[in-house]
Image: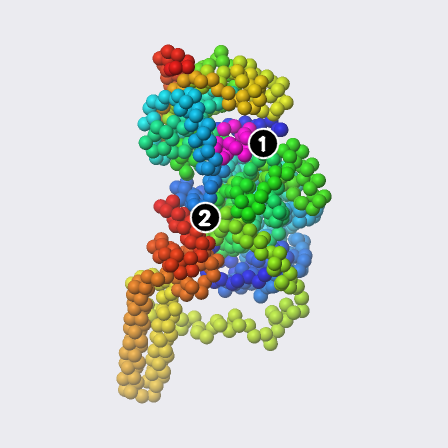
Amino acid sequence: MAEPTRTPLSLRERRRQPRGEELVPAETLKSHLPGVEPDRRLNDWGRSERIEGVFDATLVEFFYRHWFRAEVEGIENVPSTGGALLVSNHSGALPPDAAMIGKSIREEHPHPRPLNITVEHFFKGYPGFAMLTAKIGCVPAHPANVHRLLFDEEQLVVVFPEGRKGTEKLYKDRYRLRRFGRGGFVEAAMRARAPIVPVCVVGAEEAAPVFAQLTLFKKLTGLLYFPITPTFPHFGLLGMLGYLPAKFKIRFLEPIRFEDEGMHEDKALVQTVAHDIRARIQENLWDMLALRKSVWFG
Amino acid sequence: MTALRKQPARPGARDSAMDSRRILVTGLSTYWGGRLAQALEAFDEVEAVIGVDNEEPRVELERTEYVKVGAQHALLRRVVEAAEIDTVVDTRLVVDSTTTTSAKAHDNNIIGTMNILAACSGVDSPVRKVVFKSSAHYYGCEQDDPAFFDESMARPHPPRTPIERDIVEAEASLNEFAEKNPDVTVSILRFANVLGSDVRTSHIGLFSLPAVPMILGFDPRYQFVHEDDVVHALEHAVKSNLPGIYNVAGDGVLALSEVAGLLGKPYAPVLPFWGTGLAASALRRVGVNIPPEALNQLRFGRGLDNRRFKAAGFDYGYTSREAVLKLGEHLRLHPLVRGAQEPYRYEREVEDFLRWSPHVKNAREQSLGSLNRDQLAELQRLVSGYARAPEPVTDDQEQRLQAAERAAEKAVQRAKKAEQRAAESALEATERAKKAERRAGAAAEEAVQRLTAASERRDAAPESPVEHYDDLAAEEVIALLASLEREDLQALRDYERRHANRSRVLSAIESVLARRETRV
């Protein structure tokens, strides 16, 4: 298996426009999006409502309601229409946070909308994962994908700017946010003029604590990382789902809006906003942790 | 090869102003060259269609002239200059490595393209437009690809297979040509995987197997374009001025498992995820031909952003899904009708006789020309002067308008006769001329009445928005749908439910309606 290459969340260098070629306005292109074919079970991203529905009604439902007993605040900060970029902290060997955020929007929001989860390109290249991830609403974290979802299709997208650094971190570093990449997510939102909704998730760190990372096994299996958790690897792959019943709390913060065109070209502004968002999430995480009386009962 | 239906109004065409008159089609013996030449012949604005190739054409052509010449630029240049070619359409590109050896493909794709461009370049060249048929293999298929490639994206990794290398290099030489010849319009069309009943591609080969082969654990995204849309797209690029690169792919990206479902076949994850290439070469031994450029596609898949070409005025006849369904129908029917048709064979003497012998009566040319241009213009002025049509003329009114025109024409002729006689006797003539004029006026008024009556009848009659609807086959109805308004579509749906109730037509109407709604 080839080592997955990482794509920065900024657009790759654009090819020079050939001479004489007119640029089509983005709004015109938007109107030419393909229509919905009612007989299809999958959408153009490969998402299958049927398979997602099965997961949602069984596994996700069980974890959300009975295992993690998720508590949600600030759901009104998720817009009911238009594209919006949710930015969250990330943790856990097989992170349960994305699924819980998606479920909370479906359950608590007055206008439930599907959530597109950006994932590493790795999943597209690993057998099995490649089939499944797309079907349940995961989209490879390519800047062009995020832009199309936010701007053209006006959907909800969740990104984890910490990326792999977030899920790799050990239990002792819990709730300490890693570096927020290169701020590509801010650039994507500014380009699409979509609001950013910061999200804080408490509980995921304790639900799937990682005690160590084994580099040798990571290389042998071709996986992204090979963690030692309470149930993995000694219970096999299913052990990845062996979450501890920590209490989940999800807090949606006030959206940050970008109305002006061309903001994404200002690199300094992008970095400042990225830092600002990271600080806000970190601050709210400390706040939520200070209020938490018990890891298991909230 | 089947003969083509000749449709005057194509679904792919919105504007009809064509500045290409003398067209050179390279690769006439390829499927695309032949079909494009057939399509271009149907346009009256096109004065000459000349096809060049090493091999003889494999489809019946009415007036395309075939010149047996390969890609030798000196000879081609002479052809181009002698015939004052203004548009060159290059359809030769080999995009499927199963069709020929990689050395031949390389010769054809790189050396051939260079030669053809050399024949078109230079200050004194008459060529004003070059249309190049390329392939979405340009982008390749990789793990970190975007879900939808748009035209401005460079491929993220260097090409991996010979065919991909060829395509990238051929496009590079086209870009160079465009830079050196700034007054030539260069259009590059990148086509997704083509499906259809007549064309042969390796993917159609895979889909014809009893089960669709897949790589274990992968379900790649695929986008297709129907063969008719390919021809219409090339035609559209010839007709309009489209500098730059355009992706051509039907709406909708399907998962391979979905494709198998639409074809009504099981899918077989027979290829292992490790050593896929090895397994593919083993399968090649037993006759299952999976080309190397398809292996990565079977793993990672590819989607294209087709909106730019749509914004350039092209309407697709088929979505990806419809193209697959169409292929499925063909595959089921194919074993039954195979061999029923004699393949076309090119005979130089016969073709020359048909084109040049004075004894051949050409129905096409006779239908033109009973009226000269001035007469027509005069008539039109007359008719439009009397009949200020209150609403845009629709197809079904056009016939009535023509009837009115004929009546008016008669009146004009009568008026002219009267004028002649006026030279003989002035007094009598003025009277008669006045009478004739009155008659002309009356005729035109009658025409107006007929027109309004017709439109009233049309408004009053709710039964079907398309005339002779019941005579149309399902495909023809579906082809018409794109041109109908929302209300008409709804009326048509109700009508179809009540009468023929064909499920294909109904679902097509539904999908067009749904598409309209999402666009609003």
Looking at the image, residue B384 sits to the left or right of residue B41; the answer is left
Residue pictured at 63% horizontal, 59% vertical: B338
Residue pictured at 41% horizontal, 63% vertical: B469
Q: Is A133 colored magenta in this rendering?
A: yes
From the top left corner, tell me how far across and down residue A273 is, in percent. Answer: 39, 23
Binning the other alpha carbons within 10 Å of mark 2 as few (below 14), some (14 to 19) or many (20 upward) gives many
Q: Is residue B142 above or below residue B116?
A: above
Residue B310 is tagged as 2
Which is closer to the viewer, label 1 or label 2? Answer: 1
Give the quarter of the image for residue B488.
bottom left
Q: Is A15 colored magenta in this rendering?
A: no
Q: Nearer the viewer, residue A49 or B438?
A: A49
Q: Quadrant of the N terminus of chain A?
A: top right
From the top left corner, tell me how far across and down residue B99 is, in percent. Answer: 66, 49
Tell me, yes or no, if residue B366 can be seen here.
Answer: yes
SS label for mark 2: helix
Q: Nearer the viewer, residue B491 or B388?
A: B491
Q: Nearer the viewer, residue B81 or B259?
A: B259
Q: Label 1 to label 2, Cα distance in Å?
A: 35 Å
Residue A127 is tagged as 1
Residue pictured at 43% horizontal, 21% vertical: A67
Chain letter for mark 1, please: A
Binning the other alpha carbons within 10 Å of mark 1 as few (below 14), some (14 to 19) or many (20 upward) gives some
Q: Is residue B479 above or below residue A166?
A: below
Q: Is there a contact, CB below 8 Å, between mark 1 and mark 2? A: no
Q: Which residues are magenta?
A: A119-139
Residue pictured at 36% horizontal, 35% vertical: A82
